Image: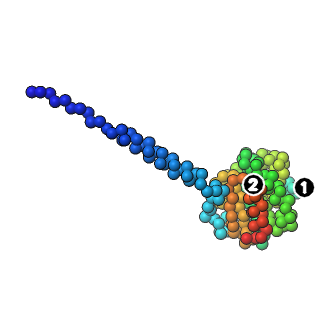
Amino acid sequence: MSEIEVQPRRRSPLVFLIPLILFGALALVFAVGLFSGDASKVPSALIGKPAPAVTLSQLDGLQRDGQPVPAFAMADLAKGRATLVNVFASWCAPCRVEHPFLVAMAESPAVKAGKVALVGMNYKDEAENARRFLGALGNPYSAVGVDRSGRAAIEWGVYGVPETFLIGPDGRILEKHVGPLDAQTAGRLLTRAAAGK
């Protein structure tokens, strides 16, 4: 009786390439999604809807022209004028980058004349740090609401700071900008806010 040699079955080298090919295809899909389009134009389900009614406390100890800076409420956002709501934090590096543009917006004729309100939502911040941030860089806001827990930001659909919302005279969200403002975006938002649409 002769012995039969059983040779192991050899796998094709292509079998080992399949996971690599799949990984490459998946990486390509993610890269296209990541680098295509404008990251600041993140769609929001809230566009065209009333700004969420949230209760925010004022930033303790923050003053402007010797008076305490109030918090803002939904009623303040629907007073027949447009409002720009900027979500910021002292620990946010891009917030420092955009801050000079907010200060310039506060000095614009539309804001000074009361046609447009500029308010801030301080996100997950310590009051002392937020006051120091605004003291060092300037306070462009007529009102600052504090969102220590981040709950209000969730209601507003905030992805991260900074973000800026344009609220129409009727209290509806007209636009959302994700990321730091630059001169062009700040100017465009201010022009649209002054037009009230």
Which disc is residue 66 wearing?
1
**Secondary structure category for the residue under label 1:** loop
Q: Residues within 10 Å of mark 1 (few under 14, many from 20)?
A: few
- Rendered image quadrant of residue 5: top left
Q: Nearer the viewer, residue 177 or 119?
A: 177
User: Of callouts 2 and 1, which one flags the residue occurring earlier in the amino acid sequence?
Assistant: 1
**Secondary structure category for the residue under label 2:** loop
Residue appearing at x 67%, y 68% in the figure? 50
Where residue 13 appears, as percent x and y from the top left, is 36, 38
> Can residue 57 be seen from the camera position used here?
no
- Rendered image quadrant of residue 129: top right
Residue appearing at x 72%, y 66% in the figure? 167
Q: Is residue 29 above or below residue 171?
A: above
Q: CA distance from mark 2 to mark 1?
A: 30 Å
Q: Is residue 87 above or below residue 81?
A: above
Where residue 134 appears, as percent x and y from the top left, is 81, 50
Q: Amino acid at mark 2?
A: Asp
Question: Please, which colouring scheme is shown?
Answer: rainbow
Q: Amino acid at mark 1?
A: Gly
Image check: 123 left or right of 65? Answer: left
Residue appearing at x 87%, y 56% in the figure? 64
Image check: 128 left or right of 21? Answer: right
- Image quarter hosting the N terminus: top left
Residue that badge 2 annotates? 182
- Image quarter hosting the C terminus: bottom right
